[in-house]
Image: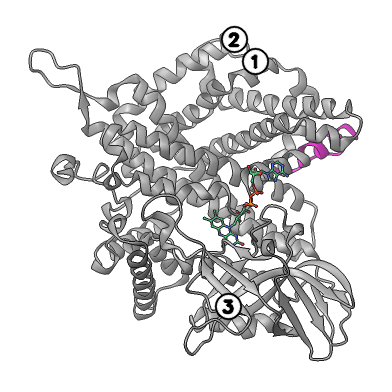
Amino acid sequence: VAWAGSRHAVEVADRMARLVASDPVFRKDTRTMLSRKELFKDTLKKAAHAWKRIVELRLTEEEANLLRLYVDQPGYVDLHWGMFVPAIKGQGTEEQQKKWLPMAYKFQIIGCYAQTELGHGSNVQGLETTATFDPSTDEFVMHSPTLTSSKWWPGGLGKASTHAVVYARLITEGKDYGIHGFIVQLRSLDDHSPLPGVTLGDIGGKFGSGAYNSMDNGVLRFDHVRIPRDQMLMRLSQVTREGKYVHSDVPKQLLYGTMVYVRQTIVADASKALSRAVCIAVRYSAIRKQFGSQDGGPETQVLNYKTQQSRLFPLLASAYAYRFVGQWLKWLYTDVNQKLEAKDYSTLPEAHACTAGLKSVTTSATADAIEECRKLCGGHGYLNSSGLPELFAVYVPACTYEGDNVVLLLQVARFLMKTVSQVAAGKQPVGTIAYMGNIQHLMQCKSAVNTAEDWLNPAAIKEVFEARALRMAVNCAQNISKAPSQEEGFSELSPDLLEAAVAHVQLIIVTKFIEKLQEDIPGPGVKEQLQKLCSIYALHLLHKHLGDFLSTGCVTARQGALANELLGKLYAQVRPNAVALVDAFDYTDHYLGSVLGRYDGDVYPALY
Ligand SMILES: Cc1cc2nc3c(=O)[nH]c(=O)nc-3n(C[C@H](O)[C@H](O)[C@H](O)COP(=O)(O)OP(=O)(O)OC[C@H]3O[C@@H](n4cnc5c(N)ncnc54)[C@H](O)[C@@H]3O)c2cc1C
């Protein structure tokens, strides 16, 4: 229940997972052996079958989302529901929503999200596709003026989509008003062929066999394609019949709601991917035996090796940490929306920085962790049937899409630098940066930890994480101020700024884990186990980043050594419950897709 969030969540997730697992159409054990074309056909078949089941069983939105999750095969529907529909909801006027959403909900049209181009991804303002208004016909003319302006990457674009939300430079009355979104039909609704002036294709095979190759990431070029004026997404700004560009009185901050929503799902996905990898590695480590046999006695389960524990249990703890911070982000999304409705925009920059940072830190750590889990499973982890290669190949682009992780952390750093200067000017920060208001104390405090067990105290942990994050940010701000200009300083110090941003985000995750444990947690002994995982999560970070903590004077070398001593003890305490802690994820064998992670532990016959 702690993992799922509520009893209701356990029940629905379990029911949907079993529905998928028991349906032969959703089988996925042979998918890595399929050719690209067969795999794509298999994806179309599964998507259509999932839709049929959703309609037949009259599933709710929550149930339908879970069913699609457990089908576990990337495909065009992910972009249709995850990007196309939210873009229209967030950026379309009420009238536009009324026109387009019912068609999208019924799959009468299939949509994708076409932003990235061959020449530009991260720098959205550098996009080159143009949408030029022609007042003589009341239309926009969509055009790809250069090779590098070709849309490149959108999932669902290559083969499946009939429509796209296309981002292009809006030009009217001879003036360039920058990037705006447009709904553009790409293919005929009769025979699915590309419309005149539209060039479409698939951009080719991607990392790993099977894996993300089920997705038709595509290329798109326009040759003076005309669309009606009312297909510009006009919630925030409009072009009038005469071609005048006007801002509506809806503030642009409204877009923050969608952004927080999308990032919240990415953090939730990180905990899912990480927990799957950890579940496979923990179960298999309990089955696998190597060495230790004396006189024909039993060998040692590899899970009992301290090195295996010190590599694996921090990842188990991270899976829970990301899960809980993801649950908190759900709350943040509701909070942001309430504030938007009340026209209170004061906390939005903080919500933006916090979600950008969490997206970056959780996806990077998860990508690394899946690879670590592969190594933790030895040679068999490299087999497709372990499930880990595919999980890795499908997961790693999360570090790049929805904002490159480094670019996002630099945005967080910029926000931190601004906050440091505001705090210096006497402003009281709120939300996840509230701790920075405690600058007097945090700049000079010394940790009182004196024994290994003192590190079990959440307040002791929080204090050193806060002090480390703040001191790293203040150091950066001081060094930037020595540069000839703010921008030069920022650019010169960007590697340090990245580390300061990571320290801030790790503090958020640690804090949310600690706060979760202040709630009621049902089930005997569950809270105690989670407390151990919380300590492991924080202390393994302290151990890994000891250089930060020492150089900023937040802990002494002795306190660092005590933290490490406690970690060893905690691993031993978690060991007896490790398998139960991954069973709690309640993943079916179908969803795990791993012979090594089978629930019944019957690994060798399955491998053979
Ligand atoms: C699997 C997958 C699916 C995708 N799906 C879609 C989709 O559906 N729709 C869509 O529109 N796009 C999609 N994309 C594109 C994706 O959004 C972009 O690739 C992403 O935004 C990164 O941009 P880029 O490729 O231009 O990387 P670049 O920005 O070119 O990154 C290259 C390197 O430069 C660094 N860098 C860039 N700017 C800075 C800076 N200011 N400071 C320091 N370092 C910097 C980056 O950290 C990186 O190391 C998808 C991509 C992938 C891989």
Q: Is 385 placed above or below 468 here?
A: below
Q: Closest to the observer: 392 or 204?
A: 204
Q: Where does the image place residue 418, in percent across and percent down from the top left?
A: 82, 39
Q: Given contact means CB atoms under 8 Å apart, are the residues at marks 2 and 1 in contact?
A: yes
Residue 477 is one of the magenta-drawn residues: no
Label 3, residues with CA under 10 Å away: few <14, some 14-19, many ≥20 = many
Measure how far apart labels 2 and 1 are at the Cα level.
Answer: 7 Å
Q: Where does the image place residue 138, in percent across and percent down from the top left?
A: 79, 89
Q: Amino acid at mark 3?
A: His
Displayed quadrant of residue 214 = bottom left
Could you say which disc has been placed on residue 557 in the image?
2
Q: Closest to the observer: 143 or 419?
A: 143
**Magenta-tinted stretch:** 415-431
Say which residue appears at 77% left-offset and 42% top-offset.
415
Q: Residue furthest top?
A: 558
Majority SS type along the magenta span: helix
Instruction: Name the side, left or right, on which 324 lies relative to 4.
Output: right
Label 2's element?
helix
Instruction: Name the side, left or right, on which 527 lies relative to 578.
Output: right
Label 1's element?
helix
Q: Where does the image place residue 466, in percent across and percent down from the top left?
A: 68, 28
> How is this picture coloured?
one colour
